[in-house]
Image (cartoon, rainbow, N blue to C red):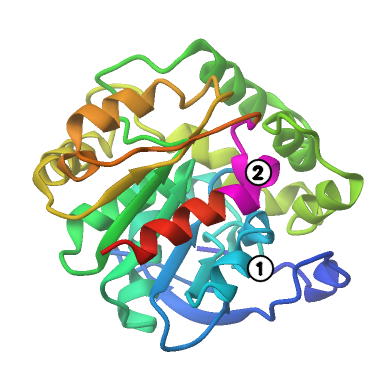
Amino acid sequence: MDLLQTPLDRFIGLVDFPYPPHRAVVTAPDGATAQMSWVQAGPADGPTVVLLHGEPTWSFLYRSMIPVLAAGGCRVIAPDLIGFGRSDKPASIADHSYARHVGWVRSLLVDVLQLSAVTLFGQDWGGLIGLRITAENPGLVAKLVASNTGLPTGDTQMPAVWWAFRRAVETAQTLDVGRLVASGCRRGLSPVARAAYDAPFPDESYKAGPRAMPLILPTAPDDPASAANRDAWRVLADLDIPVLLAFSDSDPITGSMRPVLLGALRGTAGREHPVIEQAGHFLQEDAGPVLAEHVLAFVRER
């Protein structure tokens, strides 16, 4: 597997994101290794909150949430998925699989950081990965926040807007990552922020990750990840941990997953689940501090 590393000078001058990157080698179940980057903030002895981003963003997405959580006493860890941010970037689309991404994140959290009893927040692919990790690693996740995400098995058709997104990513001669993120924001995205989302990708050769993610999402019952996702649903349905759903009010891609998760996951019962208003798919951009306050209240819940 050929790996690319984005030159670190591409990340100089990031606005409101002063956190130095940490890096460690992570290993997927099939033995594929890469260096994963993450940032952290807050007291080392505070309750740990793991923030998982999705496609095509990176941990920069959480820049307005990290200060709220850290000031509230949380130890915050925000990784960059392999292929994104300051993590290594496999050069081929074929190097990416759902199983590898789950394994790489698990390797960071369990093998490298040796975490347990964390609050895991997952949005978009961060949720697709985080839900699997929660189901497959008892004791790792004590509380779960699912935000504009789901766990597809290929047994239900994806919405037309998602297929349009997949076709756009698959066929674009030049993949404009900053524009893709902006299109998922209800309140707009500044030129500075757009540049930060473009920073990990100096040219098209670095973009196998963003191009691969729509292709490896299960869209048919016999897709490679479908069986593992069905197994995860069975575990999550009876898992006795608190679950918070924090969806936005304006996400045509994942909005339909909220009632599915609400009806299927035992841990959602008996609590109010916020709907973040005037926010699109990337609700961290549209309403990050508000979202962070909901997460902080959930962490403090006894």
User: Disc 2 versus disc 1: distance between alpha carbons?
Assistant: 24 Å
Q: Is residue 204 left or right of residue 210?
A: right
Say which residue appears at 71% left-offset and 38% top-offset. 181
Question: Quick check: 289 left or right of 115?
Answer: right
Within 10 Å of the Cα at label 1, are there few (<14), some (14-19), or many (20+) other Cα atoms? many
Task: Locate the C terminus and report the quarter of the image it occupies.
Answer: bottom left
Please determine whether, in this image, residue 276 is positioned above or below residue 2: above
Q: Residue at image x 28%, y 32%?
A: 261
**Residue position marked by numbered label 2 in the rendering:** 287
Q: Quadrant of residue 12?
A: bottom right
Q: Horizontal and vertical percent for residue 89?
A: 60, 61
Percent x, y for residue 13? 88, 70
At mark 1, the secondary structure is loop
Q: Choose top left, top right, bottom left or bottom right for residue 161.
A: top right
Q: Which kind of residue does numbered mark 1 sit on?
A: Arg
Please say whether residue 71 is visible from this viewpoint: yes
Query: Which residue is at 15% across, 64% downward?
Result: 138
Q: Which mark is residue 86?
A: 1
Residue 257 position, x and y percent, is: 37, 26
Closer to the chain start, of discs 2 and 1, is 1
Instruction: Please name which of the two marks, 2 or 1, marks the residue nearer to the observer.
Output: 2
Q: Magenta stretch: dominant SS?
A: helix
| Chain part drawn in magenta | 279-290
Task: State the image quarter where residue 87 is shown.
Answer: bottom right
What residue sits 45% from the left and 37% below the top? 274
Residue 148 is marked as: none
Secondary structure under tag 2 reads helix
Viewer-nearest residue: 268 or 301 = 301
